[in-house]
Image: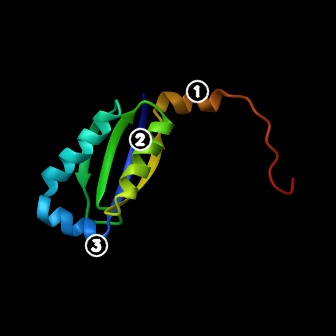
Amino acid sequence: MAKFLLKSTFTVDGIKGLMKDGGSKRAEVATKAIEGLGGRVESLCFGLGEYDTYVVCELPDHKTAAALAIAIRATGGVDTRVVPLLTPEEVDEATRQQLKYQSPGA
């Protein structure tokens, strides 16, 4: 399975829902949605910075991650961005791939 970081910001309506439901309920809803797609939540935290929530999860593939983000954003309460994550071993494999690339203007 592929690993992803979901970074989300609540809209005004989303904040109202958070105030009504509480953080535990929102975490439960997010976890159920991810598990319903065959995924697994590794961590789910609320933040006080640029984003309101950070979720590290595993999902079957990139299409599933896109479907999740589209479904979440379509509700209008949360603006979610998906960041694919790579393991150190995957980066090792990437650095061993041979390719030719010409820098602009070279």
Q: Secondary structure at mark 1?
A: helix
Residue drawn at point x = 54 percent, y = 33 percent: 91
Q: Residues within 10 Å of mark 2 (few under 14, many from 20)?
A: many
- State if disc 3 and disc 2 touch (CB < 8 Å): no
Query: Which amino acid type is shown beneath numbered disc 1?
Result: Glu
Q: Position of residue 68 (x, y in %)?
A: 40, 45
Q: Which mark is residue 4?
A: 2
> Can residue 98 be seen here?
yes
Which of labels 1 and 2 is toward the front?
A: 2
Q: Earlier in the sequence, mark 1 or mark 2?
A: 2
Q: Position of residue 35 (x, y in %)?
A: 29, 34
In this rendering, the answer to whether 33 lies above or below 98 is below
* Left or right placement of residue 27 versus residue 94 in this view: left
Q: Earlier in the sequence, mark 1 or mark 3?
A: 3
* Left or right placement of residue 49 versus residue 105 in this view: left
Q: Which mark is residue 57?
A: none
Which image quarter: residue 64? top left
Cα distance, mark 2 to mark 3? 25 Å
Cα distance, mark 1 to mark 3? 43 Å
Residue assigned mark 1: 93
In this rendering, the answer to whether 50 lies above or below 7 is below
Q: Residues within 10 Å of mark 3 (few under 14, many from 20)?
A: few
Query: Which amino acid type is shown beneath numbered disc 3?
Result: Val
Please tell me which residue lies in front, 103 or 76.
76
- State if disc 3 and disc 1 touch (CB < 8 Å): no
Cα distance, mark 1 to mark 2? 19 Å
Q: Secondary structure at mark 3?
A: helix
Residue drawn at point x = 26 percent, y = 46 percent: 30
